[in-house]
Amino acid sequence: MLEISFAVVVVAGAALVIGRIRGAADRDIGSEEEFVDLPCPWCQAPTTESDAACPACAQPFGVTSST
């Protein structure tokens, strides 16, 4: 009975270690939303690829002037 309990604890510990290693690897890769592309040309705040406007100064990106 003691041997079975020890085996269960070892297997559970191994599963926990493997889960943490895989979780750390997933966080290292990150997502594209976390990637800071270029700073805002107006205020130099960090922006991402999917931003339609600067999150800091609200200047829109990609809008052409009509003048």
Image (cartoon, helix red, strand yellow):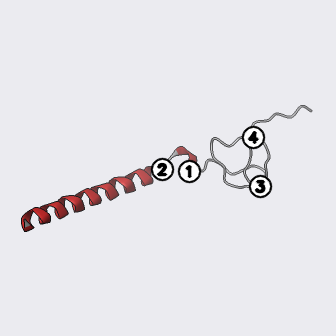
Q: Mark 3 points at which residue?
A: 43
Task: Report the mark closest to the observer, 1 or 3.
Answer: 1
* Local SS, label 2: loop
Disc 2 residue type? Gly
Q: Mark 1 points at which residue?
A: 34
Q: What secondary structure is found at the residue carrying circle 1?
A: helix
The Cα atoms of the two marked residues, 1 and 3, are separated by 20 Å
Looking at marks 4 and 2 on the same chain, the residue that comes earlier in the sequence is marked by: 2
Which mark is first along the chain, 3 or 2? 2
Q: From this viewpoint, which residue is outermost toward the top?
A: 66
Q: The disc labelled 4 sits on which kind of residue?
A: Phe
Q: What element carries label 3?
A: loop
Real-space Cα separation, disc 3 to disc 4, in angstroms: 13 Å
Residue 30, labelled with which disc?
A: 2
- Mark 1: give few (<14), some (14-19) or many (20+) Cα within 10 Å: few
- Report the front residue among 12 and 45: 12
Label 3 sits on what residue type?
Cys
What residue do we see at 79% from left, 48% from top?
58
Residue 56: x and y in percent read 75, 54
Cα separation between marks 1 and 4: 19 Å
Image depth: mark 4 or mark 2 in front = 2
**Type of residue at label 1?**
Glu
Residue 17 % position (x, y): 28, 60
Which of the two discs, 3 and 4, labels the residue nearer the N terminus? Answer: 3
